[in-house]
Image: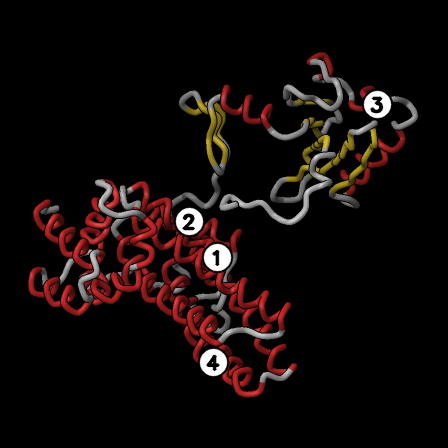
Amino acid sequence: MDESKILKLKTIIEKLHAGVGSDAVKKEFEAEFGSVSAEELAAAERKLMEDGSIQVEQVQRLCDVHASVFGGSVEEIHQGKQVDKTAGHPAFVFIKENEGLKAFLDGTFASAVKTYTQEKSDASKADLLSVLKSLSKLDKHYLRKENLFFPYLEKAGITAPPKVMWGVDDEIRDLWKLVIRNLEESNSVLEPELAKLEEQVRSMIDKENNILLPMLQGCMDGDAWLTVARDSADIGYCFNGGIEGASPSDATTWYRWNASMSGKLEDEPKANTQGEIQLPSGHFNLEELTWMLNTLPGDVTFVGVDDKVRYFSEGKDRVFPRTRSIVGREVAHCHPPKSLPVVERLVEDFKAGRKDSESFWIQRGTQFVLIRYFAVRNEKQEYLGVLEVTEEISSLRSLEGQKTLLS
């Protein structure tokens, strides 16, 4: 990539951030470059933040201006080779969700806002509240973007655009929560808040279609798209109802066909590959796995399908004593006679599929101990054993309100 071109683009963006009018900046940009790739735009913004010229929050505040200046100049948008042309492909589904979202905003949302603005009746309020809650389903769309797409940009060294976009996503989330809360608690909502919410949602559609997707095409190969397709269903979809090629079944069909053709339909666990324990969703070395389990809040014990203790964690603050001599011991021998019938009946219920979990709790002085049992089953719902999770939760019972990372 031409470093001088990036530096010139950096200078133009700095003018934009310094307050020069967007029309003037856009004319200079078009005269100097004509068009610019999504990667060059990302590199220029990244350089601005890396050398301390601007902060993420500054980029975030001017994200809409950036989109208006640069959105129509990204060459990849018009190259006609996007992956989002194939039904069921994650990019196709993502773009089609935006089409469904636009239709929702133009139709159901606009109608509800107009009726509420004119009538302010209980019926129009209830209708608007329902529509706003439907809009908040967009969270699934944003979660897929943030958790499945952004990691590939970051691996490619493109860190600034994901940070900016995630920040705007959170602004949208906060705004629809505020509007819903105001409508529920005070029976009213300010029209400027509604207008700002709609404006930000529509602006994000443009950023995703014109900036995010072209960048992803340069960062993701076939295996990456397969991973995204496989994991998308765990987060979910929205605004794709009735859109051909964008339904969950379309996405599943695309994944299964392409995964089977590439021999990657099933991700089987592999033990001790290159010295690490490989799991479908990640990998550990033995030390990391040991101490991660020992750091979990509370204690975990696993009893295998043969009713013998296979493992227990060794955290520093154990609720009940455990010694390594119990590994391989019959679980029936690990409980006092008076509680044994309950344990045996519970295990029988797990094995028979009559139960999936059970909880018990004990008050011990100032301590409140929660003991939970879970049936462990594989993807075929075959019984593999029992997981016991024990935790002293007296401090959790007094929690009120909320404490977030932003508190």
Instruction: Relative to 15, say whether 97 is above or below.
Output: below
Between tags 3 and 1, which lies in front?
Answer: 3
Give the residue at mark 2: 148
Circles 1 and 4, Cβ within 8 Å, touching? The answer is no
Depth check: give the residue in front, 105 or 345: 105
The residue drawn where x is 64% and y is 30% is 297
The residue drawn where x is 43% and y is 79% is 106
Residue 289 at x, y = what percent?
A: 53, 25
The amino acid on which the numbered mark 1 sits, given as a three-letter code, is Thr
> Which element is circle 3 on?
loop
Residue 174 at x, y = what percent?
A: 49, 59
First in residue order: circle 1 vs circle 4: 4
Circles 2 and 3, Cβ within 8 Å, touching? The answer is no
Give the residue at mark 1: 252
The residue drawn where x is 78% and y is 29% is 367
- Residue situated furthest bottom in the rendering: 118
The residue drawn where x is 12% and y is 48% is 7
Q: Is residue 16 left or right of residue 246?
A: left
Between tags 4 and 3, which lies in front?
Answer: 4
Q: Is residue 209 left or right of residue 141?
A: left
Residue 251 at x, y = what percent?
A: 45, 59
> Which element is circle 2 on?
helix
Per the model, the C-alpha gap separating discs 1 and 4 is 33 Å
- Residue 110 is labelled as 4
The amino acid on which the numbered mark 2 sits, given as a three-letter code, is Leu
First in residue order: circle 4 vs circle 3: 4
Per the model, the C-alpha gap separating discs 2 and 4 is 31 Å
The amino acid on which the numbered mark 4 sits, given as a three-letter code, is Ala
Circles 3 and 1, Cβ within 8 Å, touching? The answer is no
Give the residue at mark 3: 335
First in residue order: circle 2 vs circle 3: 2
